[in-house]
Amino acid sequence: MEDAIPDHREALKKNHNKTDLVARWVIPIKGKLYDIEFEHGIISGKRVIWINGKDILRRDMMYRLVGEDTFFVEGKRCIIHIFPSSGFKYTYKLFIDGLECEIYNQTQSKILKTWEIKINDKNYRVVLEKDTLNTYLNGDLRDEKPEFVDGGTDTQFTEDGHIFIVSARSGNRNEPICYKLAVNGAVQEVV
């Protein structure tokens, strides 16, 4: 017996295959990486914003092909600006809290220390906010607080039976602070 309701799965697949993808950015926010993709249908007027594979904003039949779309990621205001270029071409720029994406990422690289490691076929991403000493594991803020030790701080936590220690050390005031991650006693390289 046939279903009385038509099967829309094929139409849904067609609408979600990102045929009009024109721009992609990767940004770090609160210890997580966000993959932001933007579709802009020049003929259809369609605009779709995807974050980590989920469409969060969809507008069909936009008659103005230039302009901006605003959305939020982890409380940060993001704006995609669409600028006209030569002919029927357009330029797309992402701004996060008022900073152009490239400048935002450079700023984040100065205040974050990131380690990506693989243990027993499982990936771990550890991020340290240097200004607050907040530590994130795979995008989740850890509750452990840094402890003061000789010459700096250590933040220790356990995940999947592995002991992680994030250290911030400085020998004296004239030297920059050195950040290290040790997992089960082995020091890891910074990404």
Image (cartoon, rainbow, N blue to C red):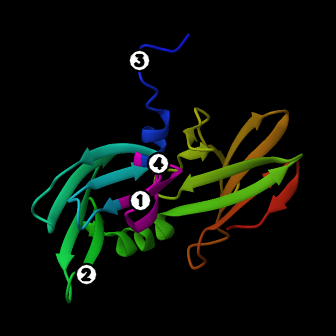
**Chain-order first, disc 1 or disc 2:** 1
The earlier-in-sequence mark between 2 and 4 is 4
Highlighted range, magenta = 15-38
Q: Which residue is mark 3?
A: 5
* Magenta highlight: main SS: strand
Taking the image as shown, residue 176 lies to the left or right of residue 124, namely left
What residue is shown with label 4? 30
Secondary structure at numbered mark 4? loop
Instruction: Identify residue for label 2.
Output: 89
Label whose residue precedes the other's in the sequence (3 or 1): 3
Disc 3 vs disc 1: which is toward the camera?
Answer: 3
Question: Does residue 151 show up?
Answer: no
Q: Which label lies toward us, 1 or 2?
A: 2
Mark 1 highlights which residue?
37
Please name whichever residue, 174 or 6, is drawn nearer the observer in this view of the structure.
Answer: 6
**The residue tagged with tag 2: helix, strand or loop?**
loop
Side of 45 where 24 appears, left or right = right
In the image, residue 19 lies in the stretch drawn in magenta: yes
Q: Crowding near pointer 3: few (<14 within 10 Å), some, many (20+)?
A: few
Q: Position of residue 160 (x, y in %)?
A: 81, 33
| Quarter of the image with the C terminus in it | bottom right
> How far apart in space, not on screen, are marks 4 and 1 (Cα)?
19 Å
Mark 1 crowdedness (10 Å alpha carbons): few <14, some 14-19, many ≥20: many
Residue kind at label 2, given as amino acid type: Lys
